[in-house]
Image (cartoon, rainbow, N blue to C red):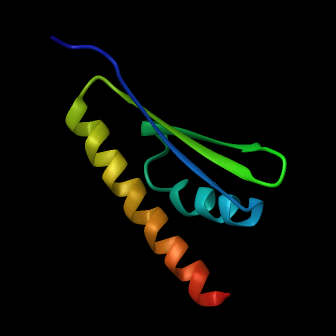
Amino acid sequence: MNGKNNTQIIWKGSKEMAESLMLSIGPDDPESFEMEIIHEENLAKLVISINSENLSTVRSTVDDILSCLSVVEASFERIK
């Protein structure tokens, strides 16, 4: 049974951090996911949408993205 697998990663925080996170993962594999920053009252929301017919591809992409986000967040915290 094949179908489309859709997954979203949603991160909330400062506009500056959302932009940094977006820049860090943009070059990773741009054809396998889409990103956008949605500005809310005092926060920015980074929404990353992953779509694939293959569930293992979605899982691999999510793992890669979460790894990148983790490294950038840790680096950002050390700079502060």
**In the image, 51: left or right of 10?**
left
Number of marks: 0
Tell which residue pokes out farthest to the top in this image.
1
| Residue placed most toward the observer, 42 or 17 | 42
Tell which residue pokes out farthest to the bottom in this image.
79
Q: Quadrant of residue 18?
A: bottom right
| Residue placed most toward the observer, 12 or 48 | 12
The location of residue 31, given as percent across then percent down, is 46, 38
Looking at the image, residue 42 lies above or below residue 20: above
The location of residue 57, given as percent across then percent down, is 26, 38
**In the image, 3: left or right of 36?**
left
Tell which residue pokes out farthest to the front in this image.
41
| Residue placed most toward the observer, 2 or 17 | 17
What residue lies at 49% left-to-right and 44% top-to-bottom?
A: 30
| Residue placed most toward the observer, 52 or 13 | 13
Looking at the image, residue 72 lies above or below residue 10: below
What residue lies at 57% left-to-right and 88% top-to-bottom?
A: 78
**In the image, 40: left or right of 47?**
right
Quadrant of the drawing holding the C terminus: bottom right
Quadrant of the drawing holding the N terminus: top left
The location of residue 68, given as percent across then percent down, is 44, 64
What residue lies at 55% left-to-right and 53% top-to-bottom?
A: 26
The location of residue 55, given as percent across then percent down, is 23, 31
Tell which residue pokes out farthest to the left in this image.
1
What residue lies at 50% left-to-right and 78% top-to-bottom?
A: 74
